[in-house]
Amino acid sequence: MKNIQRTLVLGCSLVALAGCGADEIVSPGTSGDIIINNPAPTPTPTPTPTPTQSLVTPAAGCPTINSTGGLTDAGTIQGPTGEYRVCELPAVFDADDTLGYVPGLLYAMNGRVDVGTDQGFSSTDTEVTLGVEPGVIIYAATGRSFLVVNRGNAMEADGTADAPIIWTSRDNVLGLADDDSDQQWGGVVLLGRAPTSDCSTGVFNTDANPTANPQCEQLLEGTTISTIFGGADDDDSSGSMSFNQIRFSGFAIAPGDELQALTTGAIGGGTTFENIQSFNSSDDGIEFFGGTVNMRNVAVVGASDDSIDADTGTQGALQNVVVSQRSDAGDSIIELDSPPDDFSTDARPQTVLSVVNFTFIQGSGNDQVVRARGGSRIRLANGVIQANGTPCVRIDQPETIDADPTFNSVIGDCSDTQPLRATDGAALADLEAIYNDAAANNTVDTDVTFTNAFFYDAGTAPTFDVTGLSSFFVAADYIGALESDSDDRFVGWTCDSSILDFGSGTACTSLPLRENEG
């Protein structure tokens, strides 16, 4: 996913997708879904209802909303956890609306769903806001479904630790998904009015000419609807997402043209992301194209490509991050770039990603855990890497070395033979000098073991003051995503799997059974 014009193909409206032609991948499996079971993993059992929990019974009907066409009562759907009323979302939310939690009710996307319409590069107001209440479950009725919050609109999807918001697939509802399933629907997309470095005209802003393109914006390809992101407001807000799970997402229209669980395009720093889980996303777990992205308490589990991908001028700050790959799937845990084969490394803003207080668990057989290239800048601190025989860090091109990557208090269990890697003209000696600087307190040969799934006890290892990297970061004098063995910041709102068990009590392969739904 290196070229935004090729990658963020959110396009093809439902009609257009049907005619994408030779570049379109095979239509997903069960009722539009793909089920990948090769090899079949040890299944995570669906929780057996306790004596106080009966199966879900359907709500009587669909609520009334303000948007044109309203909700469509699509009957009921039945799975292992019971029977639910299905309320199909309109194709466009054209008025402020709230999707309320109703026991025994699921909201369904039938194709692309838009929140508002594009408000333009220089707009300042928020046109339409979609609210989503705690406990709401939204599923994709077809494999080609996804939701787009257009530029100048917002979504306030704020769950709670006890009642997270869940975005998932039809197969998950039916009980057909397992711990190796993915690619069953599109994902969630938020677009905004912050700067991006990849301009659709091909004219880029540079240090030498910072106003070469005063209206740098990017168009999402493959749609009959103009879907644009980008602006000049670093603090723009596309809303808020907290305590959200996004399961079994991601599809490819053509190689390099994919969606993932969460995609952002030039959102601003006014957008709030906290307590976000991506589970088994085909292609990347989460990907950022430009803008300012601040996230706290992030879990990316089982992505089939990169877990975290940042491109085209992203200014990213992520704190308390846990990533665990499937044993036989996934590429880099972090990929950071603005590669020169797409456009000039001089394009501004420069991509900068800072990730602190992290735990990375790499699958086997991959090329590296962290990869930066194209003159982007990576900054890692207070983290632990279990690399499973792969290099911990790879830097491509001398421009990326010159971008001043920093590593501080990173505990690595890296490849014995090649702990660090430099390619495409970058000098390994330069990377080693940066990473192995005694004052940086990094390691490559620590025997990393975990308790309680992913807590690492760093003992008296020195920590780094992360508050100097971003005003978003809070002081945290510990290494890894968890402060202690009893730190429960990821418990309750996440789902569990054989890939990573948070101890939340609900399997990712099952819908939660809530006390008031029986």
Image: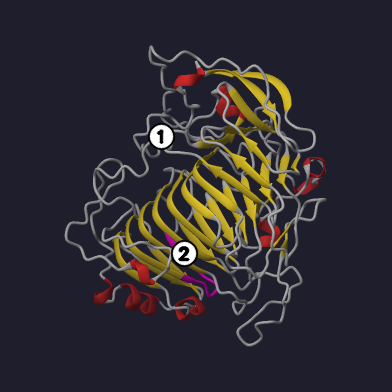
Asked whether residue 390 is in view, the answer is yes
Q: Quadrant of the N terminus?
A: bottom right
- Looking at the picture, tell me which residue is in the foreground, 283 or 86: 86
Q: Residue at x 52, y 35 (%)?
A: 134
- Looking at the picture, tell me which residue is in the foreground, 393 or 475: 475
* Label 1 SS: loop
Task: Indicate which disc, 2 or 1, sits on the residue closer to the N terminus.
Answer: 2
**In the orientation shown, which residue stands out farthest toward the left?**
460
Density class for disc 2 (Cα within 10 Å; few <14, some 14-19, many ≥20) is many
Q: Residue at x 55, y 35 (%)?
A: 36
Q: Are marks 2 and 1 in contact (CB under 8 Å)?
A: no
Q: Amino acid at mark 1?
A: Asp
* Label 2 SS: strand
Residue 272 at x, y percent in the picture: 52, 54
Residue 372 at x, y percent in the picture: 48, 67
Q: Is residue 447 above or below residue 105?
A: below
Q: Which residue is mark 2?
A: 371
Q: Which residue is mark 1?
A: 496
